[in-house]
Every structure is written in C-alpha cells, then in structure tokens.
Image (cartoon, rainbow, N blue to C red):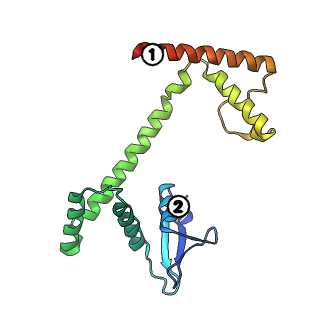
Amino acid sequence: MGDEEKQLLIKRYASRRLYNTETSDYVTLDDIAGFIRDGREVKIVDLKTGDDLTRQYLLQIIADHESKGENVLPVTVLNDLVRSYMIPGGGMMPHFLQSSFDMLRESQSKMVESMSAMNPITKIPGFEALQAQQQAFLKAMTGGLAEGWSGPSRDIGEPTAEEASEDLDEIKKQLAELQDKLSKLK
C-alpha cells in the first residue's frame, strides 16, 4: 500500500476545527497523535486555501507533549534544532534526523521479526493445551463467531467437558511447576 493510499486527510475549517475526511467527524490533536502512533500517515490541509498545515500541527503535537511534562526531546537536541534553523539552507540536521529515524524503524522491524521467529512462549509446556482452551472459551463466549479467529490453533475442534477439565488440570499442574521453578530462581 502506497503512502498516498494509507494517508489520512484532515481538513482544517475556518473555525480551526479539524475534520477527519475518512470517518466524517471532528478530531483533536490527541486523536491525530493516536493515528500517527498507529502507523497512519496524516496530511492536514486548510479547507479554504488548500495550504498544507501538516508540519505546523505535528510540531504543535510535540510541543503539547513536551509542555505536559512528557519530555521526549532533551534540551541539547532542542538547542541543536534551533541552531539548525539559523543556518542558511537548514544545514545537515534534517537529513541526519531523517536517516536516524529510518535506521531506528528498520532496526525495530528487524527486532520484531527476530523475536517472533524465536518466540519463547511457544516452548512452554502446555502451551498447545492453553491455546485449545482459549479457542474453546472464545467459541463459547461468542456463540461460535470465534471460529474465524486467526490464532494458530484454529483447526482444533471443540473439546468435550472431560477433555477441557483434564486440560485445565494439566495447565494448573504445569503452572504450579513453573511457579515453583521461578521461586527457586529467586
């Protein structure tokens, strides 16, 4: 999916209210920050003039977080940013920041890939039984709607009451063993 396809268009009205064109409702700066945290690209334009206001609003979101005591940017970085604006042409700071964030995103995605490839939870004794119990619980709670659930145990049929009780006893036993092992590690 290209950036243009997943980009969320927000229009600013003359009243300075922000309008989400995707959901047809008004949004706040906190809502926009949430969209961005969720991985959406956001473009904010002035309805009347068509001017792109995205940069202005993104800076406002950062300023709001900083003023609430959520200090993400150290003062030295803020000073460097101000200095970079004083250099004709902006200096190297914008390119450096863009490269740094690109590398950060790349390393985060590699870390997530390697973590999912070596997922240690799948090696815990009784994990399969726990998955079966979870599937049965979801099916019971949703009246069978959970059959489309994309969990790894979707091909497991509904256990009988006796099987469910045996599985639960086995899980309790294994949990107790794990707790015992953990207490010995302390």
The answer to whether residue 154 is visible is: no
* Foreground label between 1 and 2: 1
Q: Amino acid at mark 1?
A: Ser
**Quadrant containing the N terminus in the rendered view:** bottom right
Disc marking residue 35: none
Residue under pointer 1? 183
How far apart in space, not on screen, are marks 1 and 2 (Cα)?
A: 50 Å
Specify whether 76 is left or right of 174: left
Q: Amino acid at mark 2?
A: Gly
Q: Secondary structure at mark 2?
A: loop
Question: What crowding class fits label 1: few (fewer than 14 Cα within 10 Å), some (14-19), or many (20 or more)?
Answer: few
Q: Is residue 72 above or below residue 87?
A: above
Q: Secondary structure at mark 1?
A: helix
> In which quarter of the view is residue 24 placed?
bottom right
Residue name at image x 47 percent, y 38 percent: 113
The answer to whether residue 65 is visible is: yes
Q: Earlier in the sequence, mark 1 or mark 2?
A: 2
**Quadrant containing the C terminus in the rendered view:** top left
Q: Is residue 155 above or below residue 51?
A: above
Where does residue 150 sit, x and y in percent of width and height? 67, 39
Residue under pointer 2? 2
